[in-house]
Amino acid sequence: MPRRLVLASALAVPALVLAGCSSTDAPDAGAEDGAGFSIVASTSVYASLLSELVGDAADVTAIVDSPTQDPHSYEATTRDQLAVQQADLVVRNGGGYDPFMDQLTEEAGTEHVITVVEYSHDYPGAESHAEGEHAEDEHAEDEHAEDEQAETATPETAAPESEATEEAHDHEHEGHDHIEGFNEHVWYDPHTIAHLVEELGAELGELLPDAASDIQVAQEELLADIDGLESALDEVATAHEGAHVFFTEPVGGYLAAAAGLEDATTEGFAEAVEEGQDVAPATLLAALDAIEGGEIDVLITNTQTAGAETQRVIEAAEGAGVPVIEYAETLPDGDTYVSWMTANIEALEQALAG
């Protein structure tokens, strides 16, 4: 019998209640003792991570915290603009995923902005990060090496990397479209999130010195949990490497790749759905043939996007006994990032195990 594994209802509103933004008459006071220190994240995913790190030392607000809202198309409000203007730190996804944050931070002239996609190894022009275990001493060595390189580099040798980065950002801002060939749903990659948590811990430790020791402890605990996610994915890969997955949209792509799965999505299908375009009839027919012909082991869909073509492939999968997993873009009710990703990984393993 076909099974459909639902990870997050599209109607559920995350129970993650984050403190509202606040400001202080003395802008530097927040940096000294955490009072009135405000952090704004584009989505509840990053707000959850930030809340785990800072605890009560800062107020954390998510602009988009509803699983029914697609950040790609979200239009910022006056309230959002005010929140970003008052923020001491802003965390955005980038890569064309949350373009409203680009405009808000530019208009506000926000000094401290962290863009998550830049911590993905797949991001065009992104700086490389240390491989292996996520340890602060490794990053310290990397930073030291980068400093030495910056001191010895001539303008000619430094130009290619900066130009590539600039080109990537220019492409990102043109029309606020996602970067071609790049999957901006990077929070589904625990390895990227580990690098992000390391950077957040370092940044917050400097901005909130009185809470630095507590932030470091929280960071170490969170990194250990994320390492657990990567280990769980390695176990899935050991058991199911090479299994074929079909995506109605790229959400969950990094998670499946880390689990050793092969992307067998019909070319052009996921791209059309993500862009809100009609899937070409020939593409839809090829997708249905692949699913009904036994070429697909699991189908992954996005709870926040729907359409006739998506529904057709879901029905085809259910009719063919192919398990369907629904992944969301924001946190489901009552979850943290780690518990959410744990459930996603477990659902993937169960679907593949049959």
Image (cartoon, helix red, strand yellow):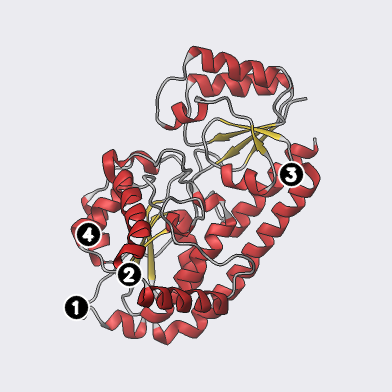
The residue positioned 21% from the left and 52% from the top of the image is: 78
Answer with left or right where residue 308 lies relative to residue 321: left
Amino acid type assigned to the residue bearing label 2 in the image = Thr
192 lies above or below 268:
below
Where residue 274 sits: x, y (%)?
44, 32
Cα–Cα gap, marks 4 and 1: 15 Å
Return the residue nearer the eye: 128 or 14.
128
Q: Which residue is mark 2?
A: 154
The residue positioned 39% from the left and 45% from the top of the image is: 97
83 lies above or below 96:
below
Image depth: mark 2 or mark 3 in front: 2
Instruction: Looking at the image, tell me whether mark 2 or mark 3 is earlier in sequence order.
Output: 2
The secondary structure type at the circle numbered 4 is helix
Where residue 203 sits: x, y (%)?
41, 74
Q: Which residue is mark 3?
A: 349
The secondary structure type at the circle numbered 2 is loop
Image depth: mark 3 or mark 1 in front: 3
Q: Which residue is mark 1?
A: 25
Local crowd size for mark 2, using a 10 Å CA cut-off: few (<14), some (14–19), many (≥20): few
Amino acid type assigned to the residue bearing label 4 in the image = Leu
